[in-house]
Amino acid sequence: MTSQKVREQFLNFFKSKEHTIVPSAPMVMKNDPTLLFTNAGMNQFKEFFLGNTVSKSKRITDTQKCLRVSGKHNDLEEVGKDTYHHTMFEMLGNWSFGDYFKKEAIQWAWELLTEVYKIDKDSLYVSVFEGSNDADNLKMDQEALDLWSAIVPKDRIIMGNKKDNFWEMGDQGPCGPCSEIHVDIRSAEEKAKVPGASLVNQDHPLVVEIWNLVFMQYNRKANGELENLPEKHVDTGMGFERLCMVLQGVQSNYDTDVFTPLIREIETITNHKYGKDEQTDIAIRVIADHIRAVAFSIADGQLPSNTGAGYVIRRILRRAIRYGFTFLDTKKPFMYRLVKVLGESMGKAFPELKEQYQLIENVVKEEENSFLSTLEQGLVLLDSVIKSSKDKTINGHKAFELYDTFGFPIDLTSLILEEKGYDLDVEGFEKALQAQKDRSRSASETSKEDWTILLEDAEQEFIGYDSLEAKVKLVKYRKVSSKKDGDQYQSVFNLTPFYAEGGGQVGDKGYLEASNGDVTYIIDTKRENNEIIHFSENLPKDISGTFKAVVDEKQRRRTESNHTATHLLHQALREILGEHVEQKGSAVHSKYLRFDFSHFSKVTTEELREVENFVNARIEGHLPFEENRNVPVKEALAQGAMALFGEKYGDTVRTVRFGQSIELCGGTHVKNTGDIWHFKITSEGAVASGIRRIEAITSDAVKDFYFKNNRTLFEVKDLLNNSQDPVKAVTALQEENAQLKKQVEGLLKDKAKNLKSELLNELADLNEVKFLAKKVDLDAASIKDLSFEMGQNKENLFLLLASEKDGKAILSCYISKELAFERNLNAGTIVRELGKYIQGGGGGQPFFATAGGKNPAGIPEALEKVEVYLK
Ligand code: ATP
Ligand code: MG
């Protein structure tokens, strides 16, 4: 059965049980400070479980893109070494939100596996939660045990402890007991030798967990206690690739058609066969796995970078490049060549891969190029470290420097050293690494006090779309201290007109005014876990009072102008450059806007002008702002709204429309495009391969821009004696200047030539040295050139040339190298000592040095005294 079919059958099975099929949520998280990536199918439904939001459909089924490379669920280091853990994998799931519970979940899972997929019943094992004697004091899951006992023989039901059979998403949040389904795919012979039940949960590659049925009924509170959820839910997750392995009768996920096309391509590119050598196989699996994680992340809008989620992606990609470099001899970019094959095999289920194919390929290739050159540079450096080592041990600090400054991976360093028979001072490396970690931790350390609650159970409301002022009360506050920002206060209001940073738009600033007139400034506004947090440097004196909260209108209006212009710019780019243009990020400030988008060549001056004209035409068209605050995602998309990185199921969104531009957007906007006044692009450039950036300004900033330009122009005209055509006048000046320059250069050359022959004639013999001490009329650079030229003509030369310019004195001493060496002379020491006559100092090398001083009157004495060095 093809993997395509496996996926379809899963979804259709649950559809037949009245589940709604929904698309996967993005793999890259937005707006959740606790998670960088989706690590389980349930992430996107967290709010439904907690009862904060009600799902429109009580039964849902989907396949969710998951990535387990950081945080609580991190399988990265295992991937490639085993055959059934991936970084990115699909989790098939069915969900009940307060609808069916254990009975149906268990029956349907069994029905699907044994009747639809026809997996041999005798190869399946199930587990049931045995209860716990700890602080939670949880009872054994008798209900699940009874339900399973009705369909599975006793000897294939395994009682499991809290670690395996009580599922929690993190330290807090929805949780509950679970039943796992394991499958034994060993040969009949093996099965006869060792019973499968004894291998369940023992990390055996052929006795693996495929499905976890979680019965959500508790919420883990911050204080560690469990409370009952308002309703009971079902959350199941089945590993798609593992299921394919079972159904396709193979013993490794990598032998399923999910991976074989990738593996064939890797074999072709690298000329290494899969299945011949364990080390090569690991490398091939790592690469086949990691290209998926990287490609899907880029398709979801997350580019490799130096921080946060982007850094995780960069590290995954580099891990794969490294494996290729070391074990498959890939010294040139090659992973980008896998993107096409991946798109062909998975593009149907995940169209985003196909749509962004070109971008993904470009980004991967560029990353490969830059990391490979790092590796090469690192190899050269490592070589020099090896050469200079005296005792066959490489100092840990040196290895750390390679790693830290040049990005050269430590495992590669140790591998190369091992091959060459050298030792690495691992302890020294670890120490240096730890020291660096401590440094960066203390630099970024912030300490947050607990919230002080002032109003229990207060609702919080954002009214900033409609007004910039409100009467508010503080709901809670806390003090936050960090090295970077010092002490700050964060507070939450019951009602707020302040827009919190989000969707690229900066947070509002403003102030709180107490009834006695005292003012507290709000310096920023941000969002955390759906709460709007106001930042200030101090707290109002009477925190329990009522305040007038006022948003800084000027900043807000300018920001709005830039935000609306960003939408128009987006529309213009798609219109003028083409539909391949996708937003890749934006920053909307009060002073300017920045917009990153996918496009594969430089935007020409002509195109930029067209874009400006397009936007300005819509500004002049006075298009009204039309918003709809509560549209289901599907409907919004059907209207043609541009979604950024894919929204998740059940979201209702806000659409913002200006004429033909419709976007899903939570930001604030002008009431009419006419308010923008004018739009002007200030720069265009590349941010990464295939990603361009435009910066632009609007409104007041454009006025300032033109005003400044105009003033400069007037000043230029003024300098040009009020020329009517300054461009022509400047061009003429430039030409004249070039000509004069040429003439001067010629004259100077002649002069130096004459001077040289003159000076050569003047050389005296002093103790077998060609000697001259003289004042000349040249600048320091020319004296140096002249000295070296004379040195080419004459051996055993000793020159002390002096000059005077703008009231300053310069001494230059030249000594032929051999002479300096033989007689132990040092030009540096000589000019330093002679420097006292011109009231200055200097230095240089033994054969050439200069000194500068403020007393030109001392030059003759210096010239006279220099002879002592030769006597
Ligand atoms: P394991 O113990 O095998 O790591 P798990 O307990 O971490 O699995 P769950 O968190 O219960 O797994 O996830 C549900 C299902 O997702 C598992 O039954 C398994 O089939 C699949 N799964 C989990 N982690 C991975 C992974 N890294 N790669 C592929 N599939 C996975
Ligand atoms: Mg796991």
Image (tube, rainbow, N blue to C red):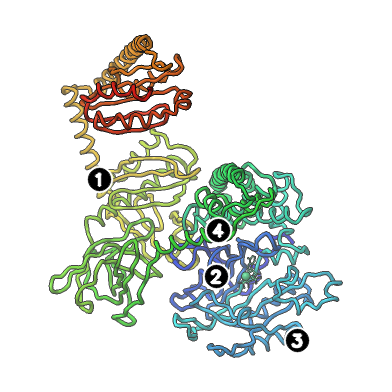
Amino acid, disc 3: Lys
Q: Which residue is mark 1?
A: 701
- Please tell me the numbered disc located at residue 623: none
Q: CA distance from mark 1 to mark 2?
A: 47 Å
Q: Quadrant of ligand 1?
A: bottom right
Callout 2–callout 4 Cβ contact below 8 Å: no
Q: CA distance from mark 3 to mark 4?
A: 55 Å
Secondary structure of residue under mark 4:
helix
Amino acid, disc 1: Ala
Foreground: disc 3 or disc 2: 2
Callout 1–callout 3 Cβ contact below 8 Å: no
Secondary structure of residue under mark 1:
helix
**Residue 466 placement (x, y as % from top left):** 27, 64
Q: Which residue is mark 3?
A: 154
Q: Which residue is mark 2?
A: 72
Amino acid, disc 2: Lys
Q: Which residue is mark 4?
A: 428
Q: Is mark 3 within 8 Å of ligand 1?
A: no
Q: How many marks?
A: 4
